[in-house]
Amino acid sequence: MRIKKSPVVEKEMTMVQHLRELRKRIFRSLLAVGVCAITLLVFYEPVLRMLTRPYRDVCNKRTDFKCDGSLFTLGPLDGLTARMKVATYGGLILALPIILWQIWKFVVPALEKQEKRYAIPFIASSLVLFSTGGYLAYWTLDRALEFLISWSGPDVTQAYQITKYISLVSLMGLAYGIGFLSPVLIVFLQLVGVVTPQKLVKNWRNAIMVIFLTAAVITPSGDPISMLSLAIPMSLLFWIAVLIGWLLVRRRQPAPV
């Protein structure tokens, strides 16, 4: 009679092993950011033209605005600082797939087998949502700039420092991208049992209020157009995340005998 071997129990990692694993994941993420940053340094000029296009479009469209779409520097280091900011922020964005994968690989040992199979859907949806948020930030940038310029007064000449403009555009892209990742977190929390779909639906008013407050805080420009263009999609994504979480939790429940 052949004896069936019992499955091997996975050995728990020690604190030192956890730290080594964390160091490895951080190193790989930083390496990916570095490679992407160097790539953006090579293509800095076309990237800069793309980032300044919304500003130029506003200046060309509104002839009553005192601006020509150009940027200026206040010191000899501003040009270098602008390049490094484009490389740093852009490197983080381009390396996001690898960063998310490294985070998942670090978290996976603590998850159950049922939860590990959601790796690819979670990462794929995170990339799609982050990209959508970044595109929305870029698409609404000209409207946000038009609002800000109009509130500065008709007699004010617009002269933007290149480093501050790049910081604004980059931070808006990151803010929108991170904001659009909120449904992934909500679905994950439902799967691991931290919150339930019923509890989220019961407290939906508080959730919407938190979403609008978060959008107001993380929006770098602070204008109402940017805040609403982030808060409204996040509110819609909240309900979609609750529905997806409810369906997944329902599928995992054992069928009644």
Image (cartoon, rainbow, N blue to C red):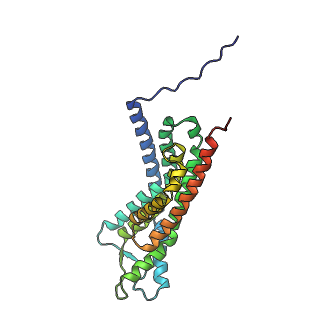
- In this view, the residue farthest toward the right is 1
Quadrant position of residue 212: bottom left
Residue 240: % across, % down: 58, 57
**In the depicted view, which residue is nearer to us: 227 or 90?**
227
Residue at x 47% of width, y 70% of height: 228
Residue at x 38% of width, y 82% of height: 151
Q: Is residue 255 left or right of residue 129?
A: right
Quadrant position of residue 8: top right
Residue at x 46% of width, y 88% of height: 63
Residue at x 56% of width, y 54% of height: 242
Quadrant position of residue 217: bottom left
The C terminus: image quadrant: top right
Image height of 46 relative to 152, above or below: above
Residue 244: % across, % down: 60, 52
User: Across the whole image, how many numbered discs are drawn on residues?
Assistant: 0
The N terminus: image quadrant: top right
- In this view, the residue farthest toward the top is 1
Image height of 68 relative to 120, above or below: below
